[in-house]
Image: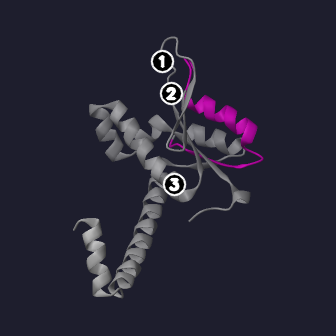
Amino acid sequence: MKRSRKSKEYLFVDGYNIINSWENLKEIAKVDLEQARSALLEILAEYKHYSDIEIFVVFDAYMVKGNNRSKEEYKGLHVVYTKENELADHYIEKALDVMGREMRVRVATSDWIEQQIILSRGGIRVSARELQVEIEDEMKMVSKKRKRLNTKNDINIGRLEDQVLHKLKDWNGK
């Protein structure tokens, strides 16, 4: 379900908090943290595609010596790696100071203290579990919609004459 331009929504995701909260990602991270980050980004990129929410995924790099903040785009997502000595929480709080009271900004984290700060700065808090359920629900709706469209397409194909169907199959190489 696409949202209108007037009600543009922004979602900040505390990347490592979500990875450590979702069981499937937590298991992947035990073996390979980079793989867990990639899996999270894939899930959020698909969600962004269907929801039209502007998503910022923030990863802590505060313990990485000499790291400067870096930003990149990944399949429509805004991915931020914080600079040395900067937590994802702090980056998100600064963004909320700028955007929080004028725009619809949600922040996904299960850090209780961070949730209180988010609320005080005009943001809307979303727990890791709530985000997971929201994404799963959206994907279920998309799947149902696809099934309906495929059924409709199958019915329309069934109405084609046999000769046309045969030509289409030949053309498709089947």
Task: Give the mark nearest the N terminus, 2 or 3.
Answer: 3
> Circle 1 is placed at which residue position?
63
Q: Where does the image place residue 142, in percent across and percent down from the top left?
A: 45, 66
Q: Where does the image place residue 18, in percent across and percent down from the top left?
A: 45, 42
The reply to whether the C-beta atoms of the residues labelled 1 and 2 are less than 8 Å apart is yes
Query: What residue do we see at 48% from left, 18% from top?
Result: 63
Residue 115, image quadrant? top right
Q: Residues within 10 Å of mark 3 (few under 14, many from 20)?
A: some
Q: Nearer the viewer, residue 56 or 112?
A: 56
Q: Nearer the viewer, residue 145 or 164?
A: 164
- Secondary structure under badge 2? loop
- Secondary structure under badge 1? loop
The reply to whether the C-beta atoms of the residues labelled 3 and 1 are less than 8 Å apart is no
Q: Amino acid at mark 2?
A: Asp
Q: Is residue 20 visible?
A: no
The reply to whether the C-beta atoms of the residues labelled 2 and 3 are less than 8 Å apart is no
Q: Amino acid at mark 3?
A: His
Q: Which residues are magenta?
A: 82-110
> Circle 2 is placed at which residue position?
60
Residue 116 lies left or right of residue 140; in this view the side is right
Query: What residue do we see at 50% from left, 23% from top?
Result: 61
Q: Where does the image place residue 55, in percent across and percent down from the top left?
A: 57, 45
Q: How is the image coloured?
A: one colour
Q: Amino acid at mark 1?
A: Met
**32 above or below 65?**
below
> Circle 3 is placed at which residue position?
49
Q: How many dots with numbers?
A: 3
Q: Residue furthest right?
A: 102
Q: Please check the rendered image and state whether residue 46 is part of the magenta-colored stretch, yes or no.
A: no
Q: Please check the rendered image and state whether residue 105 is part of the magenta-colored stretch, yes or no.
A: yes
Q: Residues within 10 Å of mark 2 (few under 14, many from 20)?
A: many
Of circles 2 and 3, the one toward us is: 3
